[in-house]
Amino acid sequence: MERKLILITNDDGVGAQGINELARLMMELGDVIVVAPDSARSGAACYITCTQAITLNHRVDMEERGLQVYACSGSPVDCVKLALEQVCPRLPDLLVSGINHGDNASCSIHYSGTMGAVIEGCMKGIPSIGFSLRTLKHKCDFSPYADEIQRIARFVLTEGLPQDICLNVNFPEVSELAGMRICRMGRGRWVQEWISANNPRGMNAFWLTGRFLNLEPHSEDTDYWALDHGYGAITPIKLDMTAYEVLHSLTPLIS
Amino acid sequence: MERKLILITNDDGVGAQGINELARLMMELGDVIVVAPDSARSGAACYITCTQAITLNHRVDMEERGLQVYACSGSPVDCVKLALEQVCPRLPDLLVSGINHGDNASCSIHYSGTMGAVIEGCMKGIPSIGFSLRTLKHKCDFSPYADEIQRIARFVLTEGLPQDICLNVNFPEVSELAGMRICRMGRGRWVQEWISANNPRGMNAFWLTGRFLNLEPHSEDTDYWALDHGYGAITPIKLDMTAYEVLHSLTPLIS
């Protein structure tokens, strides 16, 4: 049987601990190609680089580890697009993105570069999974999640995923998971998002910060509830954002 | 009755023709505040600027036109977030984004900075609409769409929109619209996306380009079909990306 081909990317950059841990786990499941941003691209969402040329550099220094690694000057989505046309010998059997340092639950999926890459992989017909850890640390202990990550990846390699659907997997920072849950995306938003930046030239300058506001803290079926209670959260995400339930009620708009 | 407050942004930048046309149309419906990127941010999606401070500059030169205009060094989503916390005296009654030069139908919504701003407005509880014109021109005739844009904006100002749902409105480039249609997001993807960039230092460098592949060209209920046949397309878009239809089938993943 042909060995599986697994494409790995992230938004924390090729040097982040999370992607190196993910590569190590995936090498046990197949042949691994890493194409990731050359530095951090947090909050990159589905950003595509339209206004400048981007570069792709083979990291020869990392070849000894038995995997191909490329650093790209573009966004996570650029990385996936470039990998598929310029690097991979065929369509990968699986795309995994992460392990992100920071969760991508609830509304944060919209801002997530980790999930941007997953959405791009899904659009291209590849079973795609994003892995994120709720942590603020650059150096983390990923060992409590290793078995689950391999198990989920193996399941998707074997079973595939439905058309135009990908997975968003989030872990809480715990020494032992309470378990895994299949969840929906919780409702939430960020508030108090700016602090003034001291600026020597008197301009109005601001840093993005913010506090997450959970709009349904007591709903046990959400990804956010799972993380708050020590569970890993698996959320199926669809490319089609149409609000079918209101199509009919919009008829007055065209009559 | 208090005058309506309308927040306007885009991803083509504050100097684009589309946003100036949109501001002119909205000034007939209420008080207008424009907070837009200082230059083009095409393909910005829901990008948020995490790694540097961003600036916000009052464009005093445009005050004579009777509207407040601010140029921001960040992304379209940054513009909305900054506008709400630092500029607007209260939550706007409506957010409109565009008029984008280029359509944002089918999968392109995922990459669209125009729609990124709309999704952000929706997340913050503001009835939000994105307007895009399928054109490659920087200078366009927007007059065939003016009445529809005002009519849709007026409808949403009066009726509001359901919670966590926003509108994506796309127009074809025509002298007269065949009509308007309520549509779902069509299935599609971009292919042949890269061309090599000549690079004097021998690096692998690439420009993003591409051709849109419509995966269901004969489905008359899609946004893409509408545009291809001279209709304007109104697509309701939801924040919740959960694929509810497969939640149950994922149970084997946690057992």
Image (cartoon, coloured by chain):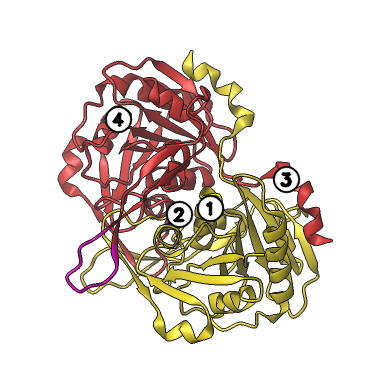
Chain colours: A red, B yellow
Give left or right: position of A21 versus B44.
Answer: left
Other residues around mark 2 within 10 Å, as few (<14) / some (14–19) / many (≥20) = many
Which residue is the extreme one toward the right?
A: A255
> Mark 4 belongs to which amino acid?
Met
Labels 2 and 1 positioned on one and the same chain: yes
What secondary structure is the magenta-colored segment mainly? loop
Q: Mark 1 points at which residue?
A: B119
Picture coordinates of residue A190, whole percent (x, y): 42, 45
Picture coordinates of residue A193, whole percent (x, y): 36, 51
Query: Which residue does the image show at 37% across and 14% down from the upper left?
Result: A178
Q: Is mark 3 on a helix, strand or loop?
A: helix
| Vertical order, B179 against B137 (above or below) | above
Residue nearest the viewer, comparing B216 with B68: B68
Q: For residue A202: magenta?
A: yes
Q: Residue A27 carries which label?
A: 4
Q: What stretch is highlighted in magenta?
A: A196-205
Labels 4 and 1 positioned on one and the same chain: no
